Image (cartoon, rainbow, N blue to C red):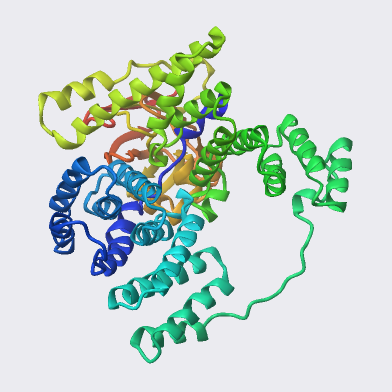
């Protein structure tokens, strides 16, 4: 299934840890002073005090002991969820930060499932939802949680209730601002002013209110996707006109969505199917097709759009799995849906937190009476899951056990075999660039190959990975290439990310403007940046471009362990 390639190019934004250490930690510290109003015993109170003092590890251990003895202690689960989310800020390991985030939400979900009136759990989950990176898709849920928490605390008269209420309203204001909901932001700020008039926080809210733009009432317009274009086939054009005339006609929207999907217009299909599920959210097949449409749209890889929105493909992955979750919820006994969601969970980015769910779905399919082809596919992806789990052990060794024999074994095992280039097909003279990427991470690395002259002046980029090439200065993952190239004429050499293996590129002796370079000394540079392990290496090799053929070999490091550069002139 070609769309599964989404995971091989999706890039998790590297500001994730910065977010936890700055934004979320600061916000959550503000609510630690809110005590449990109905605490059950001193042990829970002591755990909270440990958290207040910054001893998150000890607090979490104490809370886990309480929960082991009292599995239905909703307050303990809420605080453990809070501290688990906060602990993500203490790690520089992005995989661990992502895992802790999803675990935090899971604990808070469980706390609310046990007690639907647990105001603290709603408050904590709301703060998390508003402040985690947007592509995790928690903003709307966070806003709803904070609205509910504000309702709970607005009926209290204690100082603690007032503190929690203002925290909920302040975070609500931030959430509405992120969503672009000026009316909601205004309402939250006005509530702060009304609740604590004359206070410093009320003054800040009044200042924020004065800076808000007026809310404009705009007339509803026909969605762009329903406006026929000259490129549309006749059947598409007819359906679009019919849907535009009656945007509430769910039957026409569904037919249009299916037709666009069949013609491989996946982005268009996704837009139309989103309109459909707003009218009818009970059709599991529609949710399934919407999920696939989004996944297929992401399959195109990185393009220029990533410059404007670095989270674009991450959000698509999240949307796709969320829509598939909806389909399964509507038809939980449908094993085809379980199979597809299982594949998504295994193959989609790890930070979406769906890996374990994927394994369970696939095991359900494998253990059921299904056609052999379905059972075989489930087994294949269960094997893929085992491989990914095994790889994570090796990545951990490379990060935590440096200098050990085990680390050396990891690199030796990962190092690929050497490939070959057919020189007869190349127009001479040229420079052959032959190198190995010797390390495998959760995601393919970002890699760049470029040329400088003997004085260090940038000449041309031979290749750069899609994310780095298109995102340019908005999120630099290859700092040396970024400084040297200035991103001049790089779109033509930006391609899909290459992974562990042996790679050969050629330089036709032209600069970035397409002009032939003079004979002389040049430097070939290869730079690679792995994520989430943060492994990095840059290798340089000189080459003489003259009448006589020559080559140079550089062997250093483990991530680009081999670089051979050859000038060839038959």
Q: Quadrant of residue 156?
A: bottom left
Q: Is residue 477 above or below residue 44?
A: above
Q: Residue furthest top?
A: 372
Q: Residue sitting at 77 percent across and 68 percent down?
A: 219
Res. 347 visible in picture = yes
Name the image quarter holding the N terminus: top right
Q: Is residue 26 above or below residue 8?
A: below
Res. 570 visible in picture = no
Residue 401, percent from left and from top? 13, 33
Residue 256, percent from left and from top? 79, 39
In the image: residue 385, left or right of residue 287: left
Residue 406, percent from left and from top? 14, 24
Q: Residue furthest left?
A: 404
In the image: residue 171, left or right of residue 269: left
Residue 330, percent from left and from top? 59, 35
Q: Is residue 71 above or below residue 487?
A: above
Closest to the observer: 348 or 144? Answer: 144
Q: Residue sitting at 53 percent across and 18 percent down?
A: 425
Q: Quadrant of residue 41?
A: bottom left
Closest to the observer: 389 or 45? Answer: 45
In the image: residue 151, left or right of residue 229: left
The image shows a total of numbered marks equal to: 0
């Amino acid at each position: 299934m070609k769309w599964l390639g989404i995971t091989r190019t999706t890039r998790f934004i590297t500001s994730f840890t910065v977010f936890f250490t700055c934004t979320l930690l600061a916000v959550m510290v503000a609510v630690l002073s809110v005590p449990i109003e109905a605490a059950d015993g001193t042990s829970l109170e002591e755990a909270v005090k440990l958290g207040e003092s910054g001893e998150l590890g000890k607090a979490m251990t104490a809370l886990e002991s309480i929960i082991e003895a009292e599995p239905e202690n909703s307050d303990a689960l809420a605080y453990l969820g809070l501290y688990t989310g906060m602990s993500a800020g203490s790690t520089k390991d992005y995989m661990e930060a992502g895992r802790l985030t999803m675990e935090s939400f899971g604990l808070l979900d469980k706390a609310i499932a046990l007690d639907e009136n647990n105001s603290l759990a709603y408050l904590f989950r709301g703060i998390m939802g508003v402040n985690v990176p947007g592509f995790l898709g928690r903003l709307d849920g966070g806003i709803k949680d904070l609205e509910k928490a504000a309702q709970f605390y607005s009926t209290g008269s204690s100082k603690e209730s007032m503190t929690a209420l203002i925290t909920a309203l302040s975070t609500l204001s931030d959430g509405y601002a992120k969503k672009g909901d000026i009316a909601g932001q205004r309402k939250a700020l006005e509530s702060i002013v009304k609740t604590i008039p004359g206070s410093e926080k009320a003054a800040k809210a009044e200042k924020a209110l004065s800076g808000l733009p007026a809310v404009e009432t705009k007339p509803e317009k026909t969605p762009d996707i329903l406006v026929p274009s000259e490129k549309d086939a006749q059947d598409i054009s007819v359906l679009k006109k019919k849907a535009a005339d009656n945007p509430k006609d769910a039957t026409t929207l569904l037919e249009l969505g299916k037709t666009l999907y069949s013609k491989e217009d996946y982005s268009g299909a996704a837009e139309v199917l989103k309109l459909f599920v707003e009218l009818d959210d009970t059709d599991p097949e529609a949710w399934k097709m919407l999920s696939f449409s989004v996944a297929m749209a992401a399959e195109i890889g990185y393009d220029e759009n990533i410059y404007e929105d670095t989270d674009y493909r991450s959000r698509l992955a999240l949307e796709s799995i969320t829509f598939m979750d909806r389909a399964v919820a509507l038809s939980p006994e449908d094993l085809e849906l379980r199979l597809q969601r299982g594949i998504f969970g295994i193959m989609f980015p790890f930070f979406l937190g769906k890996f374990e769910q994927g394994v369970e779905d696939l095991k359900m399919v494998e253990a059921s009476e299904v056609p052999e082809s379905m059972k075989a596919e489930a087994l294949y992806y269960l094997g893929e899951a085992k491989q990914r789990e095994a790889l994570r052990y090796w990545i951990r060794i490379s990060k935590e056990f440096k200098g050990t024999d085990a680390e050396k074994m990891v690199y030796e095992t990962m190092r690929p075999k050497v490939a070959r280039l057919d020189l007869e097909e190349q127009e001479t003279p040229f420079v052959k660039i032959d190198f190995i990427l010797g390390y495998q991470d959760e995601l393919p690395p970002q890699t760049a190959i470029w040329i400088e002259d003997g004085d260090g002046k940038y000449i041309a980029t031979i290749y750069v990975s899609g994310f780095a090439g298109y995102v340019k200065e908005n999120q630099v993952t290859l700092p040396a290439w970024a400084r040297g190239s200035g991103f001049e004429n790089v779109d033509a050499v930006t391609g899909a990310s290459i992974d562990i293996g042996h790679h050969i590129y050629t330089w036709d002796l032209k600069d970035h403007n397409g002009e032939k370079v003079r004979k002389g000394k040049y430097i070939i540079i290869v730079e690679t940046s792995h994520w989430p392990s943060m492994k990095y290496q840059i290798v340089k090799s000189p080459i003489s471009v003259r009448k006589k053929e020559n080559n140079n070999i550089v062997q250093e490091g483990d991530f680009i362990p081999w670089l051979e550069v050859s000038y060839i002139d038959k």
